[in-house]
Image: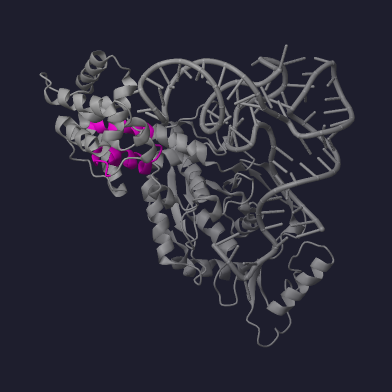
Amino acid sequence: MTVTRFAPSPTGYLHIGGLRTALFSWLTAQHSKGEFLLRIEDTDMARNSEEAKDAILKAFEWVGMHHDGEVVYQSKRFELYKQYIDQLLEEGKAYKCYMSKEELTALREEQMAKKERTRYDGRYRDFTGTPPEGVEPVIRIKAPQEGMISFVDGVKGEMNIAATEVDDFVIARADGAPTYNFVVAIDDALMGLTDVIRGDDHLYNTPKQIVVYNALGFKIPNFYHVAMINNEQGKKLSKRDGATDVMEYKTMGYLPEALLNFLVRLGWSHGDQEIFSLEEMIALFDPKNINKSSSNYNLDKLLWLNAHYIKNKPNAELAEMLKPFGVDIAGHDKLEMLLDATKERGKTLVELADQIKLIVTAPESYDEKAAKKAFKGEAKEILTDFAAMLKSWDKPLHLPSDYHEVMEKIVAEKEIGFGKIGMPLRVSVMGAMTGSGMDEIMAILGVDETVARIEKAIATIG
RNA sequence: GACCCUUUCAUCUAGUGGCCAAGGAUAUUACGUUUUCAACGUAAAAACAGAGGUUCAAAUCCUUUAAGGGUCGCCA
């Protein structure tokens, strides 16, 4: 069975790049009806926070990516890691290193000066003498000293790293706490991971983790290293490039399905297809098709996708989703009409909410430019006649088409173009020159409200 | 500095030696539709990083240059 995971460290919110990596992992698991596990990497007690962990979980909930099983916390597994450290020590596969931090720094500076890659020199690897006073040792693992550490990366291809590039790295700090590369390898193995999909900033951790796998006799999983997402200029994505926190997309009025559709196409594709439902993603996704190159983040396409998903969202659901944006129309008797008239001109829920407010609330003032243009000439007279016509209309006025008949009548009677009535009417009712079709708007408001707004406007024309 | 990865329109991408004088999508521009704004429709413009090879044939294979990114912690 395929088992994948997402393993964030709880030091901040869930990043948009992290969500894509998680999505790829989640899709891989769903595709083969496997499991997607969640592990919190909180071995660095100083930097963890409970809030960060909750924020990450909340973001997953919002996008609807559910993990299988219990969340695994590394901080609760220290005993387990300790056992493996002792085992390696006993087997002579790891050793205590008494090098002080000062000595280490000095060594690095020396190597830098010689323009070498900095690495631990293995001075305590075969140490049998008496340890120096006052130094709490760290535990280092014995990495191979010659040959290649090779693995096949599902994205990058075959990787061969010279053993000399990997030093005897620390697996337990002086205070006994295990380090990242050590615990990751153990947890991935123990949790039964078959496919590890992660950011390619971890590419160089892989040979280190393979050293651990080998020392402990664990089976090595498949690795997929996904290239980073950069900003539009190709630089590392930072806060100034816009929203990086996943939850910000919620407050900006994006639909989770739009965000996921956007992210899945960053570094992955299926021919010319752009729109993917969750089901299609699951059916079609294969991590082997992940692109090697990094991609640049650009909001335009997300906006387009969001508009698409808003347009196709059932109105009842949309009404619920609009509540946090200050629009409560769930009980509105013309709900369907109202949303049908507005949902095509809102790229985000924020914009859609604005459109709805424009209709639902009577204008307090009229856009100056629009009023100047629309309320001139015979506009007052036309509006007066139109209001009268609405009041005395002898057929019921319910549908947009009913109101359209009234429009047609006044246009015919007065021998004017639609613009002569359309523009002043629009400004009277909406306060501005833009928005949905007048027929629909009047049908939503009803005769009384429409007439009231027209009469109020007439009064201001003077 | 060392090691590793990457490079097709402004952006996401298709492309696995001949179907490519490079396709799709977004964004842009024009036109159409319309009582306005959108939406929609049609069209235009827009790319194989550079240089050398290999081959009958190269975006695709090789070499090299350049640019960008990553890693070099008792962080994760």
Say above or below: B42 vs A228: above
User: Residue A436 colored magenta?
Assistant: no
User: Looking at this view, is A166 or A84 the one in front?
Assistant: A166
The residue positioned farthest toward the bottom in the image shown: A133
Point out residue A50 in the picture as x, y percentages from the top left corner: 41, 66
**Is A146 located above or below residue B18 in the figure?**
below
What's drawn in magenta, residue-wise?
Answer: A336-364
Quadrant position of residue A118: bottom right
Depth order, front residue of A31/A408: A408
Give the percent coordinates (x, y) of residue A262: 48, 38
Which secondary structure is most common in the magenta stretch?
Answer: helix
- Does residue A66 appear anywhere in the picture? no
Residue A339 highlighted magenta (yes or no):
yes
**Taking A32 as reference, is A458 left or right?**
left
- Name the residue rendered at 52%, 46% in the picture: A21
Percent across and percent down for residue A16 are 50, 49
Whether residue A287 appears in this view of the structure is yes
Q: What colour scheme has been applied to the protein in the rendered image? A: one colour
For the point 57% across and 68% down, the residue is: A85
In the figure, is residue A175 to the left or right of A280? right
- Give left or right: position of A18 versus B52: left
| Quadrant location, the C terminus of chain A | top left
Rendering quarter of residue A407? top left
Instruction: Give the mark count.
Output: 0
Residue A356 is situated, as x and y percent measured from the top left of the image, at: 29, 39
